[in-house]
Amino acid sequence: MIVGSRFVAVCCGLFLLASLVAVPGCGKGETKVKATVTYKGEKVNGGSIDLDSKPARGGEIVDGVAHIPNVPGGKWKVKWVKGGDEGAIKPAGILKDTSVTDFEKSGVTIEVKEGQTNDVKIDFK
């Protein structure tokens, strides 16, 4: 009978532990970033942006906008990453500016709030 009581206690404990693990995510939506990206005030087209989040996240820039899904909440540094057809990247000046390709030198940081779509403006200067 003592063994049966321990078994029930262990099972109940495991059930409660599993319940606690599941509760923190309840009701929260996906955390996304919709970034309007400019370079010296001009809309960027081409390349992508990367966040120094853990795990790292990034998104391709199309017509001045990058969409990044599943971003962890917090403050993240941002950099621009060259990619695609260099002739199509606008404004052309971003290709020569090495500061925008470095998290520390870009000077751009965004804050992401969990469970929502975060509309942010990123202006590389």
Image: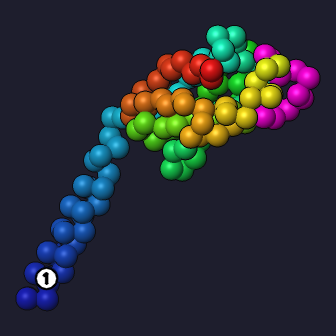
Which of the two residues, 99 or 84, is positioned nearer the viewer here?
99
> Residue 77: in sight, yes or no?
yes
Q: How is the image coloured?
A: rainbow
Element at badge 1?
Answer: helix
Q: Main secondary structure of the magenta part?
A: loop
Is residue 83 located in the magenta-colored stretch of the structure? yes
Residue identified by numbered label 1: 6
Q: Is residue 58 visible?
A: no
Q: Which residue is at the front of the view, 41 or 32?
A: 41
In the rendered view, tell whether residue 110 sits above or below residue 2: above
Residue 53 is situated, as x and y percent measured from the top left of the image, at: 51, 44
Q: Tell me: 42 left or right of 103.
A: right
The residue under the point 71% across, 25% down is: 61
Q: Position of residue 79 (x, y in %)?
A: 63, 35
Q: Nearer the viewer, residue 93 or 45?
A: 93
- x 52%, y 37%: residue: 77
Q: Quadrant of residue 80?
A: top right
> Along the horizontal axis of the image, is 57 left or right of 27?
right
Q: Residue at x 56, y 40 (%)?
A: 104
The x, y position of residue 117, in whole percent, is: 47, 24
The part of the image, by quadrant, that contains residue 86 is: top right
- Three-letter amino acid code at the position of disc 1: Arg
Q: Residues within 10 Å of mark 1 (few under 14, many from 20)?
A: few
Image quadrant where residue 7 sits: bottom left
- Give coordinates of residue 106: x percent, y percent: 60, 32
Let me know if residue 11 is in the magenta part: no
In the image, the segment drawn in magenta is 82-91
